[in-house]
Image (spheres, rainbow, N blue to C red):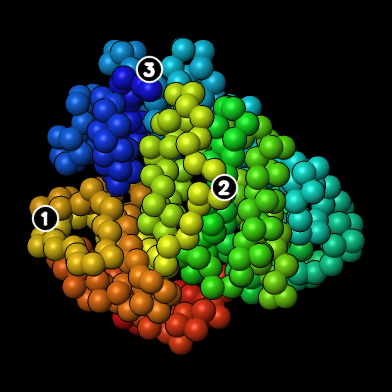
Amino acid sequence: MFRRVLVANRGEIAQRIIRACRELGIETVAVYSEGDKDAVYLQHADDAICIGPASSAMSYLDVPRIISAAEIADVEAIVPGYGFLAENAHFAEVCRSCNIKFVGPDPETIAGVGHKSRAREMAVRAGVPVVPGSDGSVDDEKAAIKWAKSIGYPIMIKAASGGGGRGMRVARNDPSLINGFHAARSEAEACFSDSTVYMERFVENPRHVEIQILCDHHGNMVYLGNRDCSVQRRHQKLIEESPSAAIDEETTHRMGMAALAMARESNYKNAGTVEFILDPSGEFYFIEVNARIQVEHSVTEMVTGVDLIQQQLLIASGEPLSIKQEDIKINGHVIECRINAEDPSKDFQPSPGKIGMFVPPGGPGIRWDSHAYSGYTVPPHYDSMIGKLLAHGPDRESARRRMLRALDEFIVEGIKTTIPIHRRILAHSDFRTAVHDTGFVERYFGAKPSI
């Protein structure tokens, strides 16, 4: 096991990693920008190093600064969490060349599954169901129209190096296809420095269901149930839960086996997530592999009892998995709400600023993962999430009611948050009866829901 690691992230996930390390007896070195100098988790780490100004490009995304901090701190490994450099193949390669263990997949795997067109090709080779689409990238208008005739409208144009809903456009006829093709390429180039796009049939009203996997360096791998992430706004997840009410155990098993087949094809090691869409008929199709720990990993932890961050560290240190597939048991139901510093009544406009009174909920079955506190200033430089609220119950309805109770208890003064929209979503009849899909939020609450 590692003696000392560097936590190359901030916010909630930095706090989470430090806690996991302390329980394993691993020393932690936290890096921070000038914008995070008052972060509470810096007091929990064994050491802390400032790596630059508040700008992410000059701190958390600056590979030389992070490597220099790791060398100064004499760490054996770097834990990237999610976001920033977590899925950066170049960063993982630099870590390897500096003889510092990157706690995540190998750089070759990150590069392979991170390019969505190549990942789709891997899925086909592995026998994993994929949505009908183009064979590789689509490079010009003529090819786009040709593929559209073959696939059939509606079409989804997707950035090969994309994520977070960027570089994606839906087309329902030839004119919108041409416009969407160029718009997706431009956005992909601006966001990912890669204008490559490919095409798939657009599945109407799908559910978004994903499988958490763990794979060690000894050929052992397991999947840990499923997570339903269908409550989204513009492809950004708002609420996650496990298990999904949309699929039964047999479908979960088939989906889990497909996820592990994808892991074998990509030579995957460490924790990861294989994402699928579920069409209204119940058929599932591969979307992508997230080669990192997910924001919503906490959902799986609560429903299985497996500490995924600790598993990441154990796997990276060379330990074989201590759990087998038959050991994975799903206990009850868990719902997670991402609490963001945003104003839902103003098109989810970010709401940075100083938090006044801050009293998170508690009680049976409640978990609150956060770095926020009374007097904390939410900076404008980073993602707006201030924490994740989870509710566990013996079944979905009890978890839903527990979450509503917890949201009602939550006190956050000084900034706007997404708590009000979460209350409305959980109270909606479509969510209560679990018939919602990925278009649920836009369909019923619109871009500017009245709160």
Q: In this view of the protein, can residue 73 be seen by the observer?
A: yes
- Residue under the point 19% across and 26% down: 46
- Lower position in the chain sequence, tag 3 or tag 2: 3
| Circle 1/circle 2 CB separation < 8 Å | no
Q: Residue furthest bottom?
A: 429
In which quarter of the view is residue 8 placed? top left
Q: Is residue 410 left or right of residue 335?
A: left
Pointer 1 residue: 374
Task: Select label 3 or label 1 by which is in front.
Answer: 3
Pointer 3 residue: 76
Q: Report the Cα–Cα distance between label 1 and label 2.
A: 42 Å
Check disc 3 and give the amino acid type. Glu
User: Disc 2 on helix, strand or loop?
Assistant: helix
Q: Is residue 308 left or right of residue 289?
A: left
In which quarter of the view is residue 239 placed? bottom left
Residue 279 location, x and y as percent? 69, 70
Q: In this view of the protein, can residue 164 be seen by the observer?
A: no
Neighbours of disc 1 within 10 Å: few (<14), some (14-19), many (20+) = some
Residue 116 location, x and y as percent? 67, 45
Q: Report the Cα–Cα distance between label 3 and label 1.
A: 35 Å
Q: Is residue 448 left or right of residue 36?
A: right
Pointer 2 residue: 325
Which quadrant, please, contains the C terminus?
A: bottom left
Check disc 2 and give the amino acid type. Gln
